[in-house]
Amino acid sequence: MQQALKYAAEQATRFEQELFDLLKIPSVSTDPAYAPHVQQAAEWVAGQLKVIGVTAEIIPTGRHPIVYGEWMGAGPNAKTVLIYGHYDVQPADKADGWSTDPFEPVVKDGVVYARGATDDKGQFFTHLKAVEAILKTEGTLPVNVKFLIEGEEESGGESLAQYVREHGQRFAADVCIISDGSMPSVDTPTIVYSVRGIVGFEIIVHGPATDLHSGMFGGTVHNPIQALAEIIAQLHHPDGSVNVPGFYDDVVPLSEAERQMIASGGGYTFEQWQQTTGAPADWGEKQYTINERIGARPTLEFTGFAGGYAGQGLKNVIPARAIAKGSARLVANQDPQKTFDQIKAQVERLAPPTVRVEVNYLASGLPAAVDVNHPAMQAAVNAYQHGWGYAPVFKREGGSLPIVADLNNHVGMPVLLVGYGLDTDGIHGPNEHYALSMFHKGIETSIHFLYEVSKL
Ligand code: BES
Ligand code: MN
Ligand code: MN
């Protein structure tokens, strides 16, 4: 193992260059226009797997390919680790507020700026480099490894869920590790023990047959932007709770012990929350703490809102339509389809007869939890302790990772969520970035992890 750590240190600059090559590929999964780049990224990942000595297969799906690879040379009596990651990224446009081109990685003060730098290219790549370092120096690994790197995570794709339902046994392993998360500070490594589910949707409000002169027709037609705003405004109660009948029916109430665990585990202090968000004040269900609202309560968020003209200067038009996109974050035992039906019914109920509304389902993932007392957890704790120099804290995550529930439900193995990012990396936003020191610490931790699993 010492040789592998030494190799990783010596090859640090090359590892960075390889990561930058991957960051240059705009593998945006949600927009079909980027499909060729998503394919290109899949091929790049498969090529890397082959170079480091792992098999590589590009599994086509109805949408974006799954990259699968394995090295089973440790034999049937050794432990097997499944490494999951995603090579797709969120959309990014220079105009969203990026200081540099999101697909032209730039390093400033030891930090690389690019879409996907931390979510998830820079994080999953640590595991490839860990495997390379051990294989190149030892000629063998202490465990068998399987790589499952998908291309639809950021668009809540169905392809992998379906593949896991049908061929999940291919991914069977003693333990799964996922590095696709973050920690509040570099001295607070964090293991996530629950992720929320999600159901994404869009609301389209149709008004007049075409855009109209706002002076000639204003005050006589119900403006779709206004009607949509009126609907959206009614979807929360003044106390911050969601105004959708049935929304909370299947929510498992928080026990005192759970609240205690949230309060004493990882998560934000109020100051960290303020620092990270830059919001003037907190908002939401005040009877729950910020960490409870993020990790253990369901929420409803609007993520996009458009209509009319928002360019330079003035254009007086009543638009024919207005659109909003949103998603509900779910906790056990909420069901995405049922929640979608409830939201759709409520929006239709709230819609005035002066407009026509359309509510469309976009994507979903189930909530999932991990048993913190599973013996395999110790491998992650020890790996962090060695690679990071600090014992990890445990927290519930507000974001979603649909694969966790899919593996729980169809394959069955402990899933360890061991993130190598920082909460302040700006994932999904402009100027997403990743400290190269975190990347290298991640590689070290991933090396330690494989040895720790072999000891279980
Ligand atoms: N890596 C995130 C989820 C995450 C965020 C985990 C922060 C831990 C800390 C993941 O890439 C993500 O963004 N997931 C989407 C899933 C959705 C599109 C189905 C999400 O949460 O919005
Ligand atoms: Mn991610
Ligand atoms: Mn993401």
Image: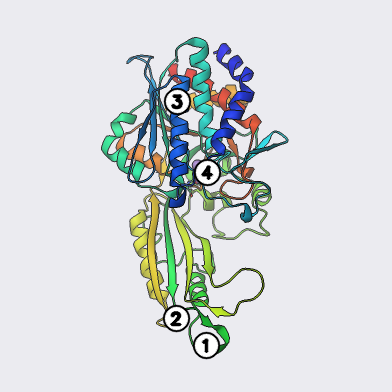
Question: Does residue 391 appear in the picture of this structure?
Answer: no
**Callout in the foreground (3, 4):** 4
- Residue type for callout 4: Pro
Element under disc 2: loop
- Residue type for callout 2: Pro
Q: In which quarter of the image is the N terminus?
A: top right
- Height in image: 53 above or below 177? above
- Height in image: 92 above or below 135? below
The mark that comes first in sequence, 4 or 2, is 4
Distance (Cα) linking label 4 and label 1:
43 Å
Distance (Cα) linking label 3 and label 4:
20 Å
Element under disc 3: helix
**Residue 49, numbered label:** 3
Q: Nearer the viewer, residue 402 or 208?
A: 208
Q: Quadrant of residue 440?
A: top right
Kindly indicate whether the residue at mark 1 contacts the one at mark 4 (C-beta within 8 angstroms). Answer: no
**Callout in the foreground (4, 2):** 4
Residue matched to label 1? 217
Kindly indicate whether the residue at mark 2 contacts the one at mark 3 (C-beta within 8 angstroms). Answer: no
Question: Does residue 73 appear in the picture of this structure?
Answer: yes
The mark that comes first in sequence, 3 or 4, is 4
- Height in image: 422 above or below 68? below
Residue matched to label 2? 208
Distance (Cα) linking label 1 and label 3:
61 Å
Kindly indicate whether the residue at mark 2 contacts the one at mark 1 (C-beta within 8 angstroms). Answer: yes
Pinpoint residue 146: horizontal percent, then vertical percent.
39, 26
In the picture, measured across the screen, residue 243 lies left or right of residue 313, that is: left
